[in-house]
Amino acid sequence: MGDIAGFVLPVDDALDDPVARLAPLQTLCAHHAKAFIVRDHLELALEMGADGVHLGSAAGDVAAARAALGKERILGVSCGVSRHAAMEAGEQGADYVAFGDPARRPGPEVDELLGWWSELFVLPCVAEGAITVEDCTRLARAGADMVAVGQDVWTDPAGAAAVVRRFRDALRAA
């Protein structure tokens, strides 16, 4: 654990020509062999030829998304703190499930879910939320296969590269 697997990109609905605006980032991800995943916009992900889609707060029909993406593309699903939602997502073809609330730091309930999931299921699980560097080691030790870091990476005064290195080091310490 500890390396960047990819980018899950939220897309502003007001963005003019999202395909053209996101294409440079998609190219950058491909150049570095990192997944380029679009959040909540299945049609845009398909149009762009993205590596996959993550169904978050606007989670739609997981089975329909799986059918549209085929088996080659990645399908992730946010499940909040619901065991039931995670099990259903897995049954309907998700490649990974995510636990947490993107607007909040993950608390003990997320740690418990990660542990429960990782003991019972093979399907990877992601911790998502307003995750700090300090949270990373704890979440990985709790059972997270991946950690989805939010917008703070881009706004930290140390700069994104320094923050990503700190996250990587924290994950490797797990």
Image: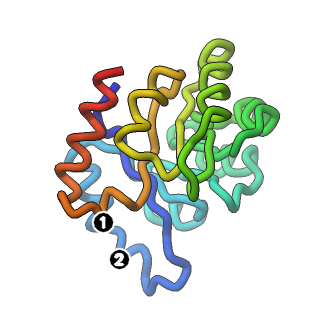
Q: Secondary structure at mark 1?
A: helix
Alpha carbon distance from label 1 to label 2: 24 Å
Position of 56 with respect to 61 (left or right) is left
Q: Is residue 104 visible?
A: yes
> Which label sits on residue 21?
none
Amino acid type for the residue under numbered disc 1: Thr
**Protein image colouring:** rainbow
**Residue 168 location (% of width, % of height):** 27, 35
**Residue 150 location (% of width, % of height):** 43, 55
Image mark count: 2
Q: Badge 1, how many Cα within 10 Å: few under 14, some, many 20+?
A: few
Front one among 131 and 27: 131
Front one among 121 and 119: 119
**Residue 10 location (% of width, % of height):** 49, 64
The C terminus lies in which quarter of the figure? top left
The N terminus lies in which quarter of the figure? top left
Q: Residue at x 68, y 14 (%)?
A: 120
Q: Secondary structure at mark 2?
A: helix
Q: Residue at x 41, y 73 (%)?
A: 19
Amino acid type for the residue under numbered disc 2: Ala
Q: Badge 2, how many Cα within 10 Å: few under 14, some, many 20+?
A: few
Position of 128 with respect to 137 (left or right) is right
Q: In the picture, residue 2 is in which quadrant? A: top left
Do the numbered discs 1 and 2 sit on residues whose CB atoms are within 8 Å?
Answer: no
Residue designated by label 1: 155
Residue designated by label 2: 20
Q: Residue at x 82, y 34 (%)?
A: 84
Q: Is residue 15 above or below residue 30?
A: below
Q: Is residue 9 above or below residue 3?
A: below
Q: Is residue 162 above or below residue 47?
A: above
